[in-house]
Amino acid sequence: MKRKLRNQNLLPVVVALVISLQKQHLVCGQECRLIGKFDLHGFVESKNHELIIGGMFPFHCRTILNNDTDMEEPKSPKCEGFNFRALRWTRAMMFAIDEINKRKDILPKITLGYQIFDTCFTISKSVEATLTFLTGQNETHPNFRCSAGAPLAAVIGAGGSALSIATARILGLYYFPQVGYASSCSVLSDKFQFPSFIRTIPSDQYQSKGFADLVTYFGWTWVGTIAADDDYGKYGIKVFKEEVEKNGVCIAFSETLPRIYNKEAIDNIVKVIRGSNANVIIIFSSDIDLSPLMEALAATNITGKTYISSEAWTTSALIAKPEYFSFLGGTIGFAIRRAEIPGFKDFLLDIHPEHGTDDLVYEFWEEAFNCTWPTQRAAFYTNISIEAIVAGRRRNISPRLCTGKEQFKDILNTYTDVSELRITYSVYKSIYTIATALHDLDACVAGQGPFPSDACANLLDFEPWQLMYYLKQAKITVFTNETIKFDSSGDVDGYYDILNWQWFSNNTLSFTKIGHYKSHGTGANYELKIDNSSIYWNTRNGVSPVSVCSTSCVPGTRKGIRQGEPVCCFDCISCADGEITNETDARECIACSSDFWSNAYRNECVLKEVEFLATDEALGITLIFLAVFGASLVIAFTIIYIMYRETALVKANDRSLSFLIQVSLVCTFMTSIIFVGKPEAWSCMARQTTLALGFSLCLSCILGKTIVLMLAKRATKSKMAEKSIPIDFKPLYQKIVAVTGLTIEVGICTAYLILTPPWVYKNMESQNIKIILECNEGSIEFLCSMFGFDVFLAILCFITAFVARKLPDNFNEAKFITFGMLVFFIVWISFVPAYLSTRGKFKVAVEIFAILASSFGLLGCIYVPKGYIILIKPERNTEEIVGGKAATNDKSAPATSASITSEINSTTVSTVVLDD
């Protein structure tokens, strides 16, 4: 029973074992094979070599579109448009490997081989080449890194940035080393996406910043951009835009070149260039993508534009054609380092179809010499050159057969041109970088290695990531003494020659070096050097082009934003009065300080004109003359009075008051002179108070006189006249009236000067462009009180004189005082509106005119009639006539009032007090 149970337990195990053996037999009976096979062409040299370096170069410009159907097996596309530059780059790789194999100081134990594929400048072919490097093409035995029969150490390529981005994503999955020689797109610096990619060409991060610095250096603020429709063009222009916007530069237009030829798109770009006022255009593109646009521009004859070229087409023979110089002359371009590689020229010429079995050499020979090789070894290509492709037409190969004896010296070819070895030099450095890393890996001392447990890698059996370590640490110095080292992003420092397209006398186009650009790290430290004198500008006047949306705003104006337009497009608005700008393209105007004002051009603050009634100007001189003249007249009358002081007319109605009135009039006349000239603290305090005191003394004395006249008038109407009783108002009382009025005025002026004295004031409110230097009168209340008292005295004088105006006498002084007061009132009433309506020095002049007019009025009305009697009619100046004791029939003399003689009831009443 137990045996039976044991047999039952073994049965399932036996069945499972049998099934497993059957499956294993079926699997071993099947054969692994590739799903498809790629049609790749290139160069290979792998026999008798321990390690292989892979290379990817664009021998052709594009693939031929296959018209495959769903009923047929898809085929790998073929390529067309032979690229002579790419063959020269390839030969540089072969030359460097051959040179390393001959050296004893680098990899002395092994030799290097190569396997090179054509990418046809397309992503699909680049990916095909990458997969071939990784898997091989043997359908029955796929072998990692053994496609050429020896281990693949690293790959250089794949040419353009878009191609390298595609291949680097695949190679990065295995951390397989890839060294770029022409892929400068900044996105390749991202080690998260591309962990195994390094390059010997500077990143476009430096080039884009260099373009921005170049544009800023020449003062261009309005530029156009054209970019290829790939990562190289898009990322390059993107960084450029970000950088120039920091410097205030605007983009006039931004166009994209079609990846596949499109006449409508090209014509639209030409239309944009023609219609734009941007005279500087930055182009980030490869020469192949740019060539259709250049042909279109040549047909339209657009000139006057300056192009800034990226390193991909700066020295390209495909673009730098003599027939393009009319519109491309003066182009400024960045180019990577140039070198003359010793022995390379001879190596280039050492190529012939009969020296090898590479089909590409046959095609090269046919394209270079425009002949057909007798055999069909190159028949897998369509024999269409790049020039024909970009022109949109096929060129038929000449029916002339190649002899094999053609000479390179008989042709001008890009392949043999070694004057501008730049990308070629970059290829050369890429190979030496890989060789140096392999040499460092082989030189590792056991137990001191960089890998876990201090292990070293085996040169003939290493992992890709191990070589990648040495590549990142590599530091090499090539024959030009240039030191190459990589930063954490796998980039080298940025260095570019700045070239200028110029025309030589031998009808050739030359790339003349006019400067250089250096940058490293984040680009914050850079050096831009340009020799302006050596630049050829393709402009009408031969000077640097002006590329602005709006002309710069000169000092004195500011930028005015145009709604809906970039900040580089603006209007220049003149600064307002009192504001300036002293720099070009100022955004805001600066207000001048209070003592300054803008000049006529609004570019400088100048001291404001200080205005006051000066003593050296015509108006001031005139007023001073009138004041002196008036004072002189008064003095003249005073002299007359002194000379005739004993005459009746002078002695009448208190001679001393007449002298005081004369003194006060001299005071008022001379006070007006204080108003002329630059205001000072003392003059501000003196002029109004002196004027008020002068008028107060004058009016108080006149009041003393008119009171007597008024009392005389009242006496003539009283009954006392019938009794012949004289009314006597003693001279003492008149003097008391004068002194009282003056004392009150002195008290008011003293309080005014002590409590709120006037001061010098800079009046900046009345006029913006001037500082009116004037006196601030301080307290208006005191000023009104001071002159209000004078007005009060004037009113009393007028009233008393008006009452006595019709005295029946021979000389009616009251009537003339009445006229004098009327003149006084008219002048000062007119003064008020005139004074308030004027500003500056004319305001002071109005007050002086009022002072002079009122003073002349009093002088003329009070003293001129007396002077007439004294000088012209002395016979009337007797006590009998003046005293009213004798009548006069002289009608030519004015009526007198120095004495009052009234015939009432045959009785004479005398109310005139004569000085003893």
Image (tube, rainbow, N blue to C red):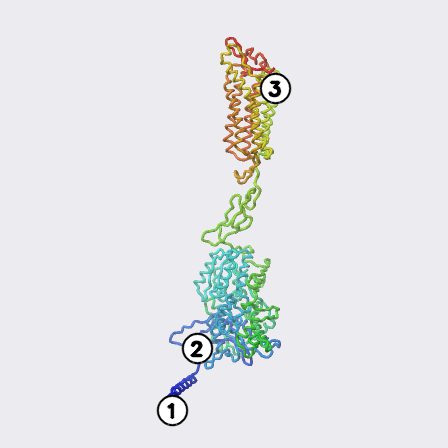
- Can you tell which mark lies on residue 641? 3
Label 1 Cα crowd, 10 Å radius (few <14 / some 14-19 / many 20+): few
Q: Residue furthest front?
A: 1
- Can you tell which mark lies on residue 393? none
Cα distance in 3D space between marks 3 and 2:
141 Å
Q: Which residue is mark 2?
A: 36
CB atoms of marks 2 and 1 within 8 Å: no
Q: Which residue is mark 1?
A: 3
Of residue 185 and residue 878, the one placed in the foreground of this image is 878
Cα distance in 3D space between marks 1 and 3:
178 Å
For badge 3, the amino acid type reads Tyr
- At mark 1, the secondary structure is helix
> In the displayed structure, does residue 342 sit left or right of residue 833?
right
CB atoms of marks 1 and 3 within 8 Å: no
Label 2 Cα crowd, 10 Å radius (few <14 / some 14-19 / many 20+): few
Residue 394: image x %, image y %? 46, 69
Q: Residue at x 51, y 26 (%)?
A: 826
- At mark 2, the secondary structure is loop
- At mark 3, the secondary structure is helix
Q: Residue at x 55, y 42 (%)?
A: 594
Q: Quadrant of residue 870?
A: top right
Cα distance in 3D space between marks 2 and 1:
58 Å
Residue 488: image x %, image y %? 55, 68
Residue 559: image x %, image y %? 50, 50
For badge 1, the amino acid type reads Arg
